[in-house]
Amino acid sequence: MKKLIIDRFEGDFAVCETESLEFVNIPKKVLPENAVEGDVITVKIDGDETRERKKRIDGLMNSLFTD
């Protein structure tokens, strides 16, 4: 699991420091409304939801290209 620290806000972005001391811009609209400078954000992949979405998309694709 990756962690980011909100360093500051600039316009529509939160400037976040990574574990490797680099900075990345994250759109504020994807953060919780109450996020503030100094908050630690964890980033992880939700494997269960990823599999469910893939299964649903595969089903839609199969229905388009069969029959």
Image: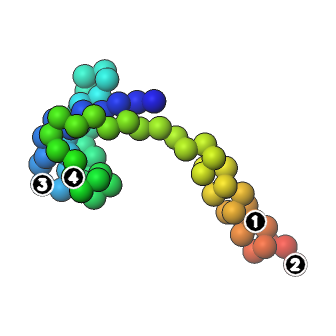
- Distance Cα–Cα, label 3 vs label 2: 50 Å
- Distance Cα–Cα, label 2 vs label 4: 49 Å
- Distance Cα–Cα, label 3 vs label 4: 16 Å
Give x and y (percent) for residue 46: 55, 44
| Amino acid type, mark 4 | Asn
Q: Is residue 54 left or right of residue 38?
A: right
Compare marks 3 and 4 and give the one earlier in the sequence. Answer: 3
Q: In this view, does 7 lie to the left or right of 66?
A: left
Query: Residue at the spot x=84%, y=73% of the render?
Result: 66
Mark 4, residues whose alpha carbon is within 10 Å: few (<14), some, or many (≥20)? Answer: few
Q: In this view, does 12 lie to the left or right of 40?
A: left
Front-most of 25 and 29? Answer: 29
Residue pointed to by mark 4: 34
Residue pointed to by mark 3: 11
Residue pointed to by mark 1: 59
- Residue 63: quadrant of the picture: bottom right
Compare marks 3 and 2 and give the one earlier in the sequence. Answer: 3
Residue pointed to by mark 2: 67
The extreme bottom residue here reads: 67
Q: In this view, does 67 lie to the left or right of 15?
A: right
